[in-house]
Image (spheres, rainbow, N blue to C red):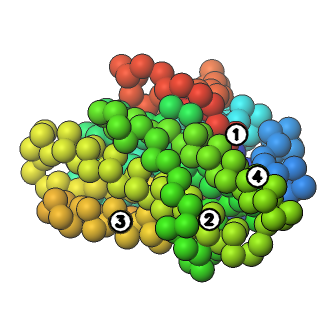
Amino acid sequence: MRAPLTFLGIESSCDDSAAAVVRVGDRAEVLSSVVEGQVVLHAAFGGVVPEIAARAHAERLDGCVERALDQAGLTLADLDGIAVTAGPGLIGGVLSGVMLAKGLAAGTGLPLVGVNHLAGHALTPRLTDGLAFPYLMLLVSGGHCQFLIVGGPEDFRRIGGTIDDAPGEAFDKTAKLLGLPQPGGPAVEAEAAFGDAARFVLPRPLLDRPGCDMSFSGLKTALLRARDALIAEQGGLMVADRRDLCAGFQTAVTAVLAEKTRRALEVYLETTPPNPAFAIAGGVAANTPIRAALETLCAGHGVRFVAPPLRLCTDNAAMIAYAGIERFRLGHRDDATLSARPRWPLDQTAPAMIGSGKKGAKA
C-alpha cells in the first residue's frame, strides 16, 4: 500500500481560474474544487480575449488557492506537492498559473509538477471512477477533440482528432451566428430541443473518408449559408428557423462523433484490452443527445461507458492535482525552469493536428 498524497492543483489554460486539493490513497478524493469563470468579462466580444483572460487569472488565482485550502480544511504545510497546468493553452493564462505555482513551491519547499492540461482531462476517469488502463478516451471540448488510447499516466496514443474547429468551438460559433448567448453549447442544445432536425440536413464532414479524423468547420459554414438564405428569402430569422437550424446542427455533430467513435472503438478493441472501457470528457460531454448516442454505441460493443460529472469534465484544477500525483509517483519533479507551453501534444509520435482553436492550440 502506497502512502496517501495530497496535492494542490492550479489550472489557468483558458478562461477558468481554478484551484483544488486532491488526496490519493486507497482511493482518490477531491477535498475541494474552486472554479471562477470569466464569461461576463468576455461576453461583449463573442469569445475569449487572451489578454483579458490572462489579467483575470493574475488577479484571481491566489484567491482561488486560498479558498481551495480553506474548503479542504488544510494549509500549505499539509500538502505533499503542487501541480500546475503548464500547457497547452492561451500562453498568458498558462504563464499566470505557472508563476504562482513556482512562487508557492519556492516559498514552501514543496515539490512542483507541471501537468499537460489534456492529460488532466484524459486521466479524469481514473480520478472519478478508478478506471483501469488501457481505455479509449474522447476528449471533446471548446479547443480540442481527439481520440486517445490511454495506456498509462504518460502513455497516450492518438488515433484521430479534428483537423480544424473543435466541436465546442463549432457550437460557440453557431450560437454567435444565430444570436444566442455564450457559451454556445448549452444555448444551442436548449434551442435544438424544440427544433425539427429533419428540416435542415447539414453535411457530415469526413464520413466518406476512412479513419477517425474529424472536421467541423464546413458544418458551421453550411449552417451560415442556410441562415443567410432564410434571411434573404423572408427578411429575417424566425424563432422556429433558429430552433430547426440548431437541431440540424446538433444532429450532424452527433452523427459525426458517433461514427468516428465507432471506428475508434474498432481500433481500440483490436488491442484486446482486458476490461474495455470508453470515457468522454470536456464540455461537449454535457450535451445530452451526444452523450446518449455514444453510450448506446458502447453498449452495442460490450464496452463500459464512463462520463465523469460535468464539474470535472469542464476545465478544473482537481484533474490537474490528480494528474500531478500520477506524474509524481512516476518520479517526475519540476523546478524554476518549468516553462509555460502554448502547444504540448500528448502523443509525441503522432503528426501535429492542423489548425488552432480560439480556446487553445490544438495538439
Three-letter amino acid code at the position of disc 2? Cys
Where does label 2 land, which residue?
246
Left or right, residue 150 beside residue 250: left
Asked whether residue 259 is in view, the answer is yes
Give the structural element (helix, strand or loop) at label 3: helix
Mark 4 vs mark 1: give the one in front: 4
Give the structural element (helix, strand or loop) at label 4: helix
Asked if labels 1 and 2 touch by Cβ distance under 8 angstroms, the answer is no
Three-letter amino acid code at the position of disc 4? Asp
Asked if labels 4 and 3 touch by Cβ distance under 8 angstroms, the answer is no
Left or right, residue 322 beside residue 361: left
Of marks 1 and 3, which one's residue comes earlier in the chain? 3
Where does label 3 land, which residue?
293
Q: Residue furthest right?
A: 44
Distance, label 1 to label 3, CA atoms, is 27 Å
Give the structural element (helix, strand or loop) at label 1: loop
The answer to which of 315 and 255 lies nearer the viewer is: 255
Mark 2 vs mark 3: give the one in front: 2
Asked whether residue 62 is in view, the answer is no
Q: Residue at x 60, y 80 (%)?
A: 194
Distance, label 4 to label 1, CA atoms, is 24 Å
Where does label 4 land, which residue?
228
Distance, label 2 to label 1, CA atoms, is 21 Å
Above/below status of 299 relative to 249? below
Residue neighbourhood size for the residue with mark 1, other residues' Cα within 10 Å, grouped as few (<14), some (14–19), many (≥20)? some
The answer to which of 356 and 112 lies nearer the viewer is: 356
Distance, label 2 to label 3, CA atoms, is 17 Å
Q: Quadrant of residue 28?
A: bottom left
Of marks 3 and 4, which one's residue comes earlier in the chain? 4
Of marks 4 and 1, which one's residue comes earlier in the chain? 4
Q: Residue furthest bottom?
A: 194
Mark 3 vs mark 4: give the one in front: 4
